[in-house]
């Protein structure tokens, strides 16, 4: 097979940090806040701007709180687990490595007594009908390392007594999130918006705020995890007064990505871009017998972190990934270290469809080179 002659203009298909937005340039960032305290008037203004624009693009209800927190999506999830869990039993739904990690933290670190594990192997979604509306429920919307997502929120009871805690880091800005079904939602900037790492977002429903103000965990709680004090939510966190010092250039970068998302048509346009991108890979899979989507059910297949299984031994897959990297045709597309051997191609909104179309012939070529 002849080597392709056209390469993706932007061969950045990493699942995090993800590709910057089309047309990105550091020169576009408003850096007026650099060198200033994040607690100064300008610092708080910029942080509040990031919160306000997040609400606008995502369509978050006015009575939900949005806060910028430390340590990316991981920090956002952990602070909720440590601050809010323990009042009632917990159902943990997981089908990939990050969800499995939340289960481990809840059982081994928090050592909660009544924790129900609802799980499935990579490529499958567990039986979500097992979720008890009386319990708190922790789950990922999109399994970044398995390429499997929940298709909707229909399985979440509108009459639930417990909280739903949703890690939506590779879903936010690319998939519809039913806010009325989500009590806590977290994500990080470096996924669908292609922002910089180190910061997370936590979104709280009124029900979640009520939990934080009425429940005090019987455990030591580090300052970095503290969202409420003395029976009241720490409102400053949700008005630009962050818990610790944020990177203001990362905040400026985030605002640039939000402005871009807004300029192209907001959330509907972002979802459409991800869907169009994922369709390129689905077409590629449908026309070949040596590759398949790790997601068994097409209805649960991710449109951002698309995971592929190949008819190759693991060492051959690594050779293929290395070859594509050396040819500058695709960077960082190997499966996550805990996942089955394969490829993981980011199809989020900051990736251009034409770059995925240019990638496909290279996947064919690389496969032919390494299969032996």
Image (cartoon, rainbow, N blue to C red):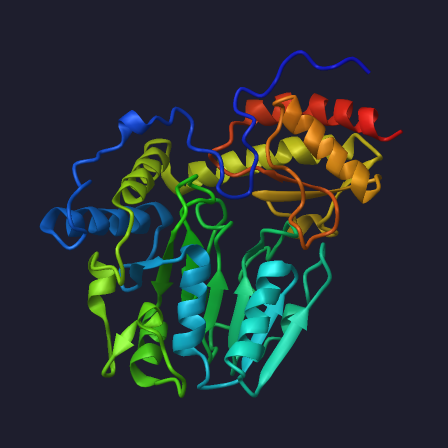
Of residues 313 and 153, the one nearer the viewer is 313
Residue 180 visible: no
Residue at the image point whose x is 35% and y is 58% from the top: 70
User: Based on the displayed image, in which of its 4 quarters is residue 123 positioned?
Assistant: bottom right
Residue 11 position, x and y percent, is: 56, 26
Name the image quarter holding the N terminus: top right
Of residues 277 and 28, the one nearer the viewer is 28
Residue 3 position, x and y percent, is: 74, 14
Residue at the image point whose x is 52% and y is 77% from the top: 109
Residue farthest to the right, as pictured: 372
Q: Is residue 147 left or right of residue 174?
A: right
Name the image quarter holding the C terminus: top right
Residue at the image point whose x is 59% and y is 72% from the top: 104
Q: Is residue 366 left or right of residue 226?
A: right
Determine whether 345 is above or below 247 in the image: above
User: Based on the displayed image, in which of its 4 quarters is residue 250 positioned?
Assistant: top left
Residue 207 visible: yes
Residue 134 position, x and y percent, is: 51, 83
Residue 145 position, x and y percent, is: 62, 51
The number of numbered badges drawn on the structure is 0
Residue at the image point whose x is 57% and y is 78% from the top: 108
Determine whether 58 is above or below 25 in the image: below
Determine whether 341 is above or below 333 in the image: below
Q: Is residue 281 left or right of residue 180?
A: right
User: Based on the displayed image, in which of its 4 quarters is residue 252 positioned?
Assistant: top left
């Amino acid at each position: 097979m002849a080597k392709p002659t056209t390469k993706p203009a932007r061969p950045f298909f990493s699942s995090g940090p993800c590709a910057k937005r089309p047309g990105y340039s550091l020169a576009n960032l408003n850096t007026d806040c650099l060198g200033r305290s994040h607690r100064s008037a300008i610092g708080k203004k910029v942080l509040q701007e990031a919160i306000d624009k997040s609400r606008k693009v995502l369509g978050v209800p006015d009575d939900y709180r949005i806060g910028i927190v430390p340590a990316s999506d991981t920090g956002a999830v952990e602070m909720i687990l440590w601050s809010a869990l323990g009042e009632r039993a917990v159902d943990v739904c997981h089908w990939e490595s990050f969800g499995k990690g939340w289960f481990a933290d809840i059982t081994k670190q928090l050592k909660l007594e009544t924790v129900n594990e609802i799980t499935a192997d990579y490529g499958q979604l567990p039986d979500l009908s097992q979720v008890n509306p009386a319990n708190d429920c922790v789950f990922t919307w999109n399994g970044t390392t398995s390429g499997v997502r929940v298709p909707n929120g229909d399985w979440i009871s509108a009459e639930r007594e417990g909280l739903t805690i949703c890690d939506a880091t590779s879903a936010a800005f690319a998939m519809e999130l039913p806010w009325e079904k989500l009590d806590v939602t977290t994500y990080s900037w470096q996924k669908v918006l292609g922002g910089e790492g180190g910061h997370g977002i936590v979104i709280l429903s009124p029900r979640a705020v009520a939990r934080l103000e009425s429940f005090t965990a019987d455990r030591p709680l580090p300052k970095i995890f503290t969202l409420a004090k003395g029976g009241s939510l720490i409102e400053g966190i949700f008005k630009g007064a962050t818990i610790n010092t944020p990177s203001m250039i990362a905040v400026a970068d985030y605002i640039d990505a939000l402005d871009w998302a807004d300029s192209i048509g907001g959330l509907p346009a972002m979802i459409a871009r991800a869907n169009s991108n994922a369709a390129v890979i689905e077409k590629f899979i449908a026309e070949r017998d040596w590759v398949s989507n790790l997601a068994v059910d097409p209805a649960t297949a991710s449109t951002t972190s698309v995971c592929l299984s190949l008819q190759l031994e693991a060492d051959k897959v690594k050779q293929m990934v290395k070859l594509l990297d050396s040819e500058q045709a695709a960077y960082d597309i190997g499966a996550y270290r805990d996942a089955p051997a394969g490829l993981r191609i980011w199809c989020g909104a900051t990736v251009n469809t034409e770059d995925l179309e240019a990638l496909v012939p290279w996947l064919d070529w690389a496969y032919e080179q390494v299969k032996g």
